[in-house]
Image: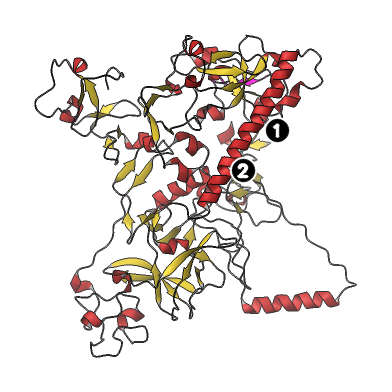
């Protein structure tokens, strides 16, 4: 931990930090007789592995063998951190590269190679590890973020915009060759240092990636040469021996077949079709032309390898559902609490042990009528009580199946009577704040499957990471099950009950409408006759269906009459509040193209009925707005518009004070 080098005579701390030290670094001449505990563990003041500041307010990673400590604010900055009921799993147990590629399930599986200096980890193998990382051992490295080179002074930028491919006045990234026109990014020219979005997000080049490399100091396109990034262990020994630093990596130049050590500031990715940029140029020499052909060929080879690997992985994953942890009861996360009632507070029913089916489905049990589960120590029926399905987990046998268009589903193995208990919906019990955070993280990682179901105002069940078979039940506009909230030993729990007699071999479904969070406006594939077309939209009733049939027949009779078709309203693809894409809620006001994320509207579920976005109400008094900011949802009525908006530098479009 002190000198960052391996060797013999290492002493392990038997405290919480799991660190190892050289005896010389500790000033010891021989191995200690008693168990060794380092100074940090003795004092209880550990250093945050992210910000490197010590303190007693740091928390330890929940993985027993990890030993890393973090401030909660520091660890929450990492999308790769996973919060659990007992704490959190730090970012060093999730692959940074897979997380960048939005492959969340793969990111936390497999063997990891971890950075010794910061909370970065990668899967072992060339596919994930950032080029320029230095291996200390087979499972420890120093990542390329710790380069001693000042990239801001050594980056060589291209002479064209990465968006429109034209020259002119360019905004240059300080860490990589990327250049942009400010107007192509819809931003003003910033003052001081600036980094592109990929560099800000920590996106890194990887081994076996085709790139453009620059060795000279000229900015002409022809001096950028196609090459392949190589793993240092795969290049000739004389190349390995050349002077280089952390953050540098060897490249193999196509055409000339030379090797050289470069860094991120002189390299940018080759994309499909780059071979054609030199067509028509007469000054290209034979070597460069050969390099272009070899680069294009090698790019297609690597692409085919990658697609073949992905196809195998998809085929393998199609045989079983995505990974999750199977649990039998709800697991509390954060501040949420499970209520436990005193025996004196639990209602007592009027059933008797001598009844034919005491507290059963067809009995007159008061508790069952009021959706209370009987307690074995309170119920007069005692052991014969049939109203303890939640506690005893009396679920009919079911199996997970693969459906045609709706992913995985759940099918019953035996017939189920109407009103019978099917399953309890269990998962992680979270509060509204954690729910919003998870939905936001899901949108950032392009996750479209949600398993969140509201229990009470501040308690939500998320069956995504942990749950039981009920998480596989699909939506249907004509379901055979429904959710019911029951009080079990003083705590509210959610059960799924049969709406009708269900024969064996039938898929189990329930209506997600107004029950589940995070779906937005997702297309429905249930196939029911009354299907509404979208999740979260009420299904058609029999009366509405009959009326539609009458209208359809009336239109067929009036063949000569010309019907003016109303043009479908088009909406924007990005959220008007934050500018990002994803699952959006559309404004229903005529001619308004605006769309929003639920999170940006501070909503947890889609608004019901006809909905007008906040752009049409005054920010001050909520009256109808007459003046609108063209860059965000701020707007003002006639009484409050004075001085609220000014003409911007972008074609004189009106903007509020947030965009001065």
**x, y percent for residue 609:** 59, 64
Which residue does the numbered mark 1 point to in the structure image? 652
Q: Which residues are magenta?
A: 167-176
Residue at image point 9% right, 28% down: 34
Q: Quadrant of residue 649?
A: top right
* Residue 60 screen position, x and y as percent: 27, 37
Say how the picture is coloured. secondary structure
Q: Nearer the viewer, mark 2 or mark 1?
A: 1
Q: x%, y% of residue 315?
A: 55, 50
**Quadrant assignment, res 343:** bottom left
Q: In the rendered picture of this protein, how many numbered marks are placed on residues?
A: 2
Question: Residue 491, located in which quarter of the rendered image?
Answer: bottom left
Which residue matches tag 2?
641
For the N terminus, give its image quadrant.
top left
Looking at the image, is mark 2 or mark 1 earlier in the sequence? 2
Asked if residue 213 is positioned above or below residue 382 in the image, the reply reads above
Label 2 SS: loop
């Amino acid at each position: 931990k002190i000198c960052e080098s391996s060797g013999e005579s290492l002493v392990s701390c038997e405290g919480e930090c799991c660190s190892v030290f050289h005896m010389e670094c500790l000033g010891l001449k021989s191995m200690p007789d008693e168990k060794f505990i380092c100074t940090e563990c003795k004092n209880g003041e550990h250093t945050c592995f992210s910000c490197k500041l010590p303190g007693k307010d740091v928390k330890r990673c929940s993985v027993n063998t990890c030993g890393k400590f973090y401030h909660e604010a520091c660890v929450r900055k990492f999308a790769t951190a996973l919060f659990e009921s007992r704490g959190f799993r730090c970012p060093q147990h999730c692959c940074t590269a897979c997380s960048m590629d939005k492959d969340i399930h793969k990111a936390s599986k497999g063997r990891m190679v971890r950075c010794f200096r910061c909370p970065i980890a990668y899967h072992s193998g060339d596919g994930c590890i950032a080029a320029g990382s230095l291996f200390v051992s087979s499972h420890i490295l120093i990542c390329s973020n710790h380069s001693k080179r000042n990239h801001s002074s050594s980056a060589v930028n291209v002479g064209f915009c990465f968006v429109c491919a034209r020259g002119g006045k360019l905004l240059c990234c300080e860490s990589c060759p990327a250049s942009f026109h400010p107007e192509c990014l819809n931003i003003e020219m910033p003052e001081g240092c600036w980094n592109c979005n990929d560099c800000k997000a920590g996106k890194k080049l990887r081994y076996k990636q085709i790139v453009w490399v620059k060795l000279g100091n000229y900015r002409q396109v022809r001096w950028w040469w196609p090459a392949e990034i190589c793993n240092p262990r795969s290049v000739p020994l004389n190349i390995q021996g050349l002077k280089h630093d952390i953050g540098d990596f060897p490249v193999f130049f196509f055409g000339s077949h030379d090797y050289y050590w470069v860094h991120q500031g002189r390299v940018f990715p080759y994309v499909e079709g780059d071979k054609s940029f030199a067509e028509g140029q007469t000054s290209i020499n034979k070597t460069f032309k050969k390099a272009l052909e070899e680069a294009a060929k090698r790019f297609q080879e690597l692409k085919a390898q990658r697609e073949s690997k992905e196809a195998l992985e998809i085929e393998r994953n199609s045989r079983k559902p995505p990974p999750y942890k199977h649990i039998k009861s709800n697991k509390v996360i954060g501040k949420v609490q499970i209520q436990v009632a005193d025996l004196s507070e639990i209602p007592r029913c009027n059933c008797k042990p001598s009844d034919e089916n005491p507290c059963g489905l067809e009995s007159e049990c008061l508790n069952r009528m009021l959706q209370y589960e009987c307690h074995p120590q309170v119920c007069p029926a005692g052991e014969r009580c049939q109203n303890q399905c939640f506690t005893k987990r009396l679920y009919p046998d079911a199996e997970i199946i693969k459906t045609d268009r709706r992913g995985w589903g759940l099918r019953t193995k035996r017939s189920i009577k109407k009103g019978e208990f099917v399953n309890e919906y269990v998962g992680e019990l979270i509060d509204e704040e954690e729910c919003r955070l998870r939905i936001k993280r899901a949108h950032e990682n392009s996750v479209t499957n949600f398993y969140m179901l509201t229990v009470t105002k501040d308690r939500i069940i998320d069956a995504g990471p942990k749950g039981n078979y009920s998480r596989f039940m699909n939506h249907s506009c004509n379901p055979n099950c429904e959710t019911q909230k029951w009080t079990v030993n003083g705590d509210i729990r959610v059960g799924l009950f049969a709406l009708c007699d269900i024969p064996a071999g039938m898929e189990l479904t329930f209506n997600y409408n107004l029950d589940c969070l995070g779906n937005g406006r997702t297309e429905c594939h249930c196939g029911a006759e009354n299907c509404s077309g979208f999740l979260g939209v009420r299904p058609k009733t029999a009366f509405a269906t009959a009326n539609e049939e009458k209208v359809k027949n009336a239109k067929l009779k009036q063949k000569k009459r010309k019907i003016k078709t109303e043009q479908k309203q088009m909406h924007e693809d990005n959220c008007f509040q934050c500018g990002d894409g994803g699952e959006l809620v559309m404004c229903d006001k005529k001619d308004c193209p605006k769309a929003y994320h639920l999170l940006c509207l501070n909503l947890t579920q889609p608004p019901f009925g006809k909905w007008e976005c906040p752009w049409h109400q005054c920010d001050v008094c909520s009256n109808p707005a007459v003046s609108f900011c063209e860059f965000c949802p701020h707007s003002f009525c006639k009484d409050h518009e004075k001085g609220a908006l000014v003409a911007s530098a972008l074609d004189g479009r009106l903007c509020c004070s947030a965009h001065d």
